[in-house]
Image (spheres, rainbow, N blue to C red):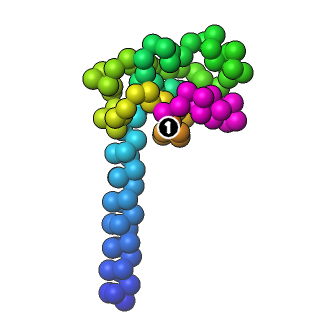
Amino acid sequence: MKKVIVLIALTGLLLIGCSGEETNANEEYVNMLSNDEGSYALYIVANLEDEITNEILQNNGIRNVESWVQETSLENARLEEVKEMPTFIVFDTKNKVYETNSRQELFEFLQEN
């Protein structure tokens, strides 16, 4: 009986530890997430020639982007994981869902999702 109780306790501790790691990963993105279910938020680190505007999104048939933040240099990047320009990261309401270095691939992802 004691073995069963110890096994259950250890399993519970493992589950608690795993859920904490997931929370920590999402904390980095908390200010980047979309506020609306079914819409995306973008984080862009790119030169102004790769700028994203409402007009560009509309002209490409993209209507599922709620907001975006654009940085124009790696030094200003808010996420340490960004190592090259351009970088385009897509967030839903919970986490990062897509990352690419191609503007065209970004548009294709947003059109398909």
Camera-side residue: 26 or 3? 26
Q: Quadrant of residue 79?
A: top left
- Vertical comparison of 47 with 77: above or below: above
Camera-side residue: 22 or 86? 86
Image point 70% across, 35% down: which residue?
112
Image point 35% across, 52% down: which residue?
21
Image point 40% across, 28% down: which residue?
85
Q: Secondary structure at mark 1?
A: strand
Q: Badge 1 local density, few (<14 within 10 Å), some, or many (20+)?
A: some
User: What secondary structure is the magenta-colored segment mainly?
Assistant: helix
In this rendering, position of residue 47 left or right of residue 54? left
Image point 40% across, 34% down: which residue?
29
Q: Find disc 1 in the rendering and name its residue.
A: 99
Residue 38 visible in image: no
- Vertical comparison of 12 with 50: above or below: below
The amino acid at mark 1 is Glu
- Vertical comparison of 3 with 87: above or below: below
Q: Quadrant of residue 106?
A: top right
In the image as oriented, which residue stretches furthest toward the left?
75
Which quarter of the image is occupied by the N terminus?
A: bottom left
Q: Position of residue 91 (x, y in %)?
A: 51, 34
Q: Position of residue 80 (x, y in %)?
A: 30, 35
Which quarter of the image is occupied by the C terminus?
A: top right
Camera-side residue: 64 or 112? 112
Q: Which residues make up the magenta segment?
A: 101-113
Residue 103 visible in image: yes
Q: Position of residue 89 (x, y in %)?
A: 48, 32
Q: Position of residue 105 (x, y in %)?
A: 59, 33
